[in-house]
Image: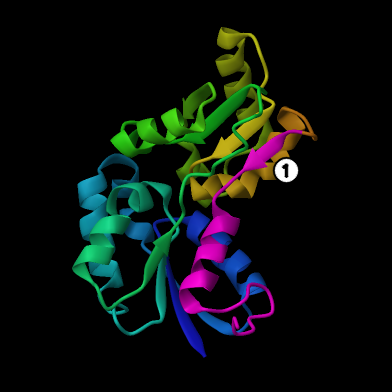
Amino acid sequence: MLKIAVFDSGYGGDLFADRLEEELPIANVIRVIDWRNAEIFLKNPRAARKQAMEALRPYIERVDLIILANYLLTATSLKYFKRKYKKQKFCGLALPCPNNQSKRPTVALTTKALAKTLNYHNYLFRLKRHVDTMCLDDWPALIDDGELDEVDIKARFDEFFLKYNYKPGEIILACSQFNDIVPELRNVVSNNIKIHDGFDKAIRDACKMLNIRGGIGKKCK
């Protein structure tokens, strides 16, 4: 059976691992969640890389694939891991790429550490659309603890969008924990809002690297 290690520092890693198990039942998904160092992954990319290396050391070259279920780590360290451990396959949660033809108001929900990176600014430039960024560093921990409710979400959105005088037509999730609050986001903004995340692309990338078909796990011809 294929072995896939999923790494993150919080509940977002579990959410992604759940989706991966649904899509790839032929794989043994190993959850490597570094809860103890969650705050580091919100503040310091270099420290996050170091902690990730320590947590993943027992799995490197012992599993078929390692997936970084963390947008900051993917943006700042995926290439590093691939260069350092050439015999190990890696992929990660890449920032979502919505249709560039859309003119709907768009907001990205992320953390300050990711928003400050050059990769994030290059990502926004490649989108060729205006995107407002909401940095929500307190939300991941609240989601991990089950303490973020719809009232809190609405209050933060109302505060942000009162400044810009609009509500978004599309939302980009650039923190894996935020997948847990999609129903609340729809209730606060609109049931018809488009929400983009990197989960599906990461699963497609994993299937491609492992030479399997998503969902039923048949070998690619």
Residue 65 within the segment the image draws in magenta = no
Quadrant location of the C terminus in the rendered image: bottom right
At 30% from the left and 34% from the top, the residue drawn is 118
- Residue 58: image x %, image y %? 28, 79
Q: Nearer the viewer, residue 98 or 11?
A: 98
- Residue 132: image x %, image y %? 51, 22
Q: Residue furthest front?
A: 221
At 69% from the left and 26% from the top, the residue drawn is 169
In the image, the segment drawn in magenta is 193-221
- Residue 198: image x %, image y %? 54, 51
Q: Quadrant of residue 64?
A: bottom left
Q: Give the secondary structure at mark 1.
A: helix
Q: Nearer the viewer, residue 158 or 83?
A: 83
Name the image colouring. rainbow
Q: Quadrant of residue 50?
A: bottom left
Q: Which residue is mark 1?
A: 183
Residue 214 within the segment the image draws in magenta = yes
86 on left or right of 164: left
74 on left or right of 3: left
Q: Is residue 58 above or below residue 145?
A: below
Q: Is residue 13 above or below residue 188?
A: below
Q: Is residue 204 above or below residue 172?
A: below
Q: Residue furthest bottom?
A: 1
Residue 145 visible in this rendered orientation of the protein: no
Q: Nearer the viewer, residue 209 or 157?
A: 209
At 64% from the left and 84% from the top, the residue drawn is 218
Identified by mark 1, the residue type is: Pro
